[in-house]
Image (cartoon, rainbow, N blue to C red):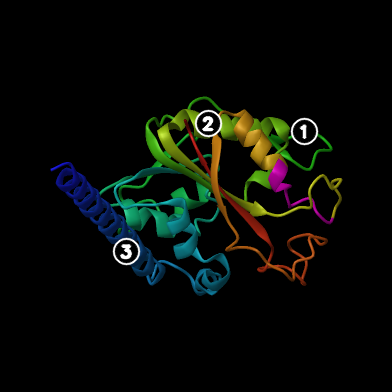
Amino acid sequence: MKKLHTLLFASTLSLAFASSTALAHEEGHNTDEALKIAMASDIRSEDERTRDANRRPVETLTFFGLEPEMKIVELLPGGGWYTKLLVPVVAEHGEYYAAIGTGRIKEQLAGQPGFEKMNIVAEDAKLWREEGSRFYSMELGSLGVTDADMVLTFRNYHNFGEQGRAAMNKAAFDALKSGGIYAVVDHTARHMEPMTDSNRRRFDPVKAIKEIQDAGFELVDFTDIHYREDDELEYEVGAKSVTGNTDRWTLKFVKP
């Protein structure tokens, strides 16, 4: 009888594992399909499409765990390259918020078909550079978002000085729920290399990990999908030899 109970328990665990695995696969499949549909949208320019092979959005967002039901925040969306992919994925079942430096996407995307539910927050955030500084400082209160499932920022970390990076990390932490994901991508600098004109738009991933952990996050994973062997980490990211093909670190943190 004891052996029978053991077998039944093992069988139940196997069925539960199989069901959860199938569900995770289905959710991932749904995200992949939604992203591919968004990538094919007419709202994207030809220049934006040409970056797909390098930026690998499906692999990147799948790694971070994006799902259509999530409440997500994109920090510093810039021209909206990722915005045009993120909003369509969560528009029906989730929520999208753009925060800080949102002027361009507000002007170009707000009200466009499929982007009616796009939320713009933290418009009062102030960004400035001290005289003689290459990097931005930031002043902001709350993003006005709580219990988010994911906060994402792409190639922005390097633009800020220590104060600005700390403010960004705190804003992300405060916006997330416990268990929420902080997804960060940026251009790679050599560890502890002094800042020069050639590496000023790169950032040391070890230093980023320490700063983000100091903000309360835990590092849970990383991926080498943006590793570029032929980027010698020597030249500014706009240099002809590396532009569009820089080595980038891709780090996944969680709020405890």
Lower sequence index among marks 2 and 3: 3
Judge the density around disc 1: few (<14), some (14-19), many (≥20) Cα neighbours within 10 Å: few
Which is more toward the observer, 47 or 205? 205
- Whether 103 is drawn above or below 144: the answer is below
Quadrant for residue 135, please give it. Answer: top right
Sequence-earlier tag: 1 or 2: 1
Residue 200 appears left or right of 16: right
Question: Residue 183 placed where, x, y %?
Answer: 52, 46
Q: Position of residue 191 (x, y in %)?
A: 79, 48
Q: Residue at x 50, y 72 (%)?
A: 49
Residue located farthest toward the top when viewing the structure as drawn: 141
1 vs 3, front mark: 3
Cα distance between the residues tagged 1 and 3: 46 Å
Would you say residue 199 sits in the magenta stretch? yes
Q: Tell me the residue at 34%/52% (across/down).
A: 67
The amino acid at mark 1 is Glu
Q: How far apart are marks 2 and 3 (CA)?
A: 31 Å
Mark 2–mark 3 CB contact (< 8 Å): no
The magenta-colored residue range is 198-206
Q: How far apart in space, not on screen, are marks 1 and 2 (Cα)?
A: 21 Å
Closest to the camera, between mark 2 and mark 3, is: 3
Disc 2 designates what residue?
A: 171
Task: Give percent across and percent down for residue 100.
Answer: 53, 39
Name the secondary structure under disc 2: helix
Disc on res. 130? 1
Q: Name the residue under label 3.
A: 29
- The earlier-in-sequence mark between 1 and 3 is 3
The type of residue carrying mark 2 is: Ala
Is label 1 in contact with label 2 (beta carbons under 8 Å)? no
